[in-house]
């Protein structure tokens, strides 16, 4: 059975050490010893260390929101995977739709990052998903397939099993509009079938596919109860202890 993975994507919030440590400590006090699900906090770079310190001794893991696929060098403004590891990161979010749209990240670039993260020992959380227009135009499956194919290019079956996929319909991110459990499940199933065809059944069954997009305590249970939804990537609701912990408690796994 795949273990649910619930990750808080704090985006460009809680970058100050004290605010980040407060939130992390608050989450840790409530769910720090939970072993039924994997809990991950992804703060901005400047609060990685304070958050790692705040969750030390608990089961909570820490992830970054991006990285550059080189060890070091002349890449002004970027962050090396080695530095993320040094900070205590276990995960790294890659190819979030905000990176794809605002920062023009391509599948090819995201693929380089995924390969590099795996090589360094970081677990990539690779984001995929269609825009509202693409959904209206009936292109959801084509877009998701394109993101999977491009982002995972060149990976072995063994490597793919380590990757966490986050299906995040762009129209549901930060909008309060959530995909219905049935609609989300349909896309997750499509992704798993694609993985079966591209690799094999055992690989497809091992990959965890999170849903992201306005997940909250009151919709978490129905979404996470779907057979192919293996967790959540949570933005807005991860910025408050009550709502993030509420999602974990309503996940159906505790
Ligand atoms: P949201 O963001 O939960 O605020 O919709 C999710 C995400 O962008 O990862």
Image (spheres, grey):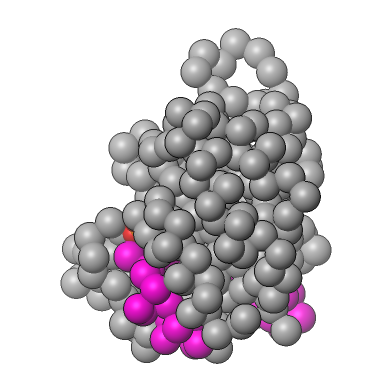
142 to the left or right of 154: left
Q: Is residue 191 visible?
A: no
Query: Could you tell me residue 132's position as x and y percent?
Result: 22, 64
Q: Residue furthest top?
A: 74
58 to the left or right of 20: right
Query: Could you tell me residue 135's position as x and y percent?
Result: 25, 70
Query: Could you tell me residue 78's position as x and y percent?
Result: 54, 23
Q: Residue at x 62, y 81 (%)?
A: 254
Q: Residue at x 37, y 88 (%)?
A: 182
Residue 81 to residue 187: above or below: above
The quadrant in which the N terminus is found is bottom right
Q: Residue at x 50, y 31 (%)?
A: 18
Q: Quadrant of residue 137?
A: bottom left
| Span shown in magenta | 201-226
Residue 212 to residue 8: above or below: below
94 to the left or right of 91: left
Name the quarter showing ligand 1: bottom left
Q: How many marks?
A: 0
Nearest the viewer among 34 and 38 is 34
Residue 149 to residue 9: above or below: below
Query: Could you tell me residue 76's position as x and y percent?
Result: 52, 14
Q: Is residue 106 visible?
A: yes
In reply to whether residue 203 is colored magenta, the answer given is: yes
Q: Residue at x 32, y 43 (%)?
A: 101
In reply to whether residue 61 is colored magenta, the answer given is: no
Residue 108 to residue 28: above or below: above
Q: Quadrant of residue 52?
A: top right
221 to the left or right of 161: left
């Amino acid at each position: 059975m795949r273990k649910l993975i619930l990750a808080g994507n704090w985006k460009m919030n809680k970058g100050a050490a004290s605010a980040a440590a407060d939130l992390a400590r608050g989450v840790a006090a409530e769910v720090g010893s939970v072993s039924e699900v994997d809990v991950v906090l992804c703060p901005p770079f400047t609060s990685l260390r304070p958050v790692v310190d705040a969750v030390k001794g608990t089961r909570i893991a820490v992830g970054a929101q991006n990285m550059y696929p080189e060890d070091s060098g002349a890449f002004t403004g970027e962050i090396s995977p080695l530095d993320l590891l040094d900070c205590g990161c276990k995960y790294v979010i890659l190819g979030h739709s905000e990176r794809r749209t605002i920062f023009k990240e391509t599948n090819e670039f995201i693929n380089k990052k995924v390969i590099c993260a795996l090589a360094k020992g970081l677990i990539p959380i690779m984001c995929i998903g269609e825009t509202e227009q693409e959904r209206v135009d009936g292109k959801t499956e084509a877009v998701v397939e394109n993101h999977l194919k491009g982002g995972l290019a060149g990976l072995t079956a063994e490597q793919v099993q380590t990757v966490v996929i986050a299906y995040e319909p762009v129209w549901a991110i930060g909008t309060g509009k959530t995909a219905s459990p049935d609609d989300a499940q349909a896309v997750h199933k499509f992704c798993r079938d694609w993985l079966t065809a591209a690799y094999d059944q055992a690989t497809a069954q091992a990959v965890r596919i999170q849903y992201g997009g306005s997940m909250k305590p009151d919709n978490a249970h129905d979404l996470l109860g779907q057979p192919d939804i293996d967790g959540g990537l949570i933005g807005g609701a991860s910025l408050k202890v009550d709502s993030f912990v509420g999602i974990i408690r309503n996940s159906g796994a505790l």
